[in-house]
Amino acid sequence: MADHPHHHGMPKATGFHLKLKEGTQSLHDQAESGNFQVRMVSGDLARLEFGGFLGQMRHIHAVLDPALQQAASGDARVARIFDESHLRLHRIEQDLKDLDHEEVAEPFPATSSFTDYIAERLEQNPTSLIGVLYVKEGATNGNKFIAKKLRETMGLGEDKAMGYLDPHGKDQRRCWNAFKETLNELDLTDAEQEECVAVAQETFKMVMTVSQQMPEVSTA
Ligand code: HEM
């Protein structure tokens, strides 16, 4: 992506991180060119539509945040990679307040499938939630850029409504580099890594399906 100044001198992806990156690269390309993502990047997403999107993310994180906490409490590898900065529910709630968008719609079918999937993974194999965390954390790289556009077009204050899209602020680069390093230090078997890659792939698809179900709001 052109607007990205930090590729120079970045160490090449290795290990478990490389598996996740390669396993989801083509899905990332699709996600980036999705209708909703393109409208977000071009910055013409209506405030109502952004609020609607955050509402769906609220349903997802109401399940994902405690699932990650629970997985971390039972598995040292999850505990090692997961930290409080990955919790998004409280940020989304503040963002929705900033937008005066406090009536959250019911979950879309795709949103419910996503939360069902998280609950099922937590039950079957909590370690594999690392795959969901990877996608959610990786997405902050692109989301930061989208946040910059939305700040401009929605004319909100610098500190308003972007807690979900830009959770790490000026620490983005440092957090992402540390996250990747920690991924590679996790004591996971090959089979466990493969399972995380499969979960990451599934997560990409579910995020895209939720975006596809976002109704377009007319600004006229
Ligand atoms: C317009 C939409 C998007 C743009 C412009 C974008 C942009 C980017 C960029 C520039 C990076 C590289 C960060 C770096 O390592 O320097 C990145 C990484 C990543 N993004 Fe996106 N992204 C978009 C959408 C998404 C979506 C919808 C998801 C998933 C839900 C996602 C998940 C990820 C992941 C997991 C990574 C990490 C890849 C790795 O392991 O290196 N992105 N994105």
Image (spheres, rainbow, N blue to C red):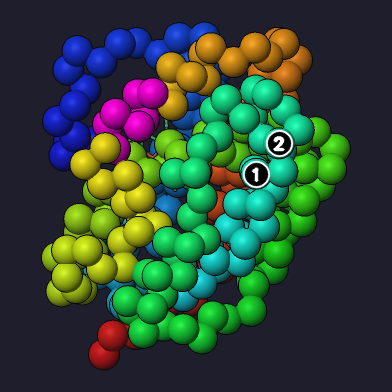
Q: What is the magenta range?
A: 172-178
Q: Amino acid at mark 2?
A: Ser
> Would the CB of label 1 be found within 8 Å of ligand 1?
no
The image quadrant where one finds ligand 1 is top left
Q: Residue at x 75, y 15 (%)?
A: 191
Quadrant in which residue 149 is drawn: bottom left
Q: Is residue 98 above or below residue 2?
A: below
Seen in the image, is 76 located left or right of residue 120? left
The residue to which callout 2 is attached is: 73
**Given contact means CB atoms under 8 Å apart, are the residues at marks 1 and 2 in contact?**
yes
Q: Residue at x 65, y 23 (%)?
A: 77
Considering only vertical position in the picture, is 63 above or below 172?
A: below
Q: Secondary structure at mark 2?
A: helix
Front in this rendered view, residue 138 or 87: 87
Give the labeled residue for mark 1: 69
Residue 216 is left or right of residue 195, and the answer is: left
Q: Amino acid at mark 1?
A: Gln
Residue at 64% of width from left, 29% of height from top?
A: 78
x then y, percent, for residue 170: 21, 41
Q: Position of residue 24 (x, y in %)?
A: 53, 30
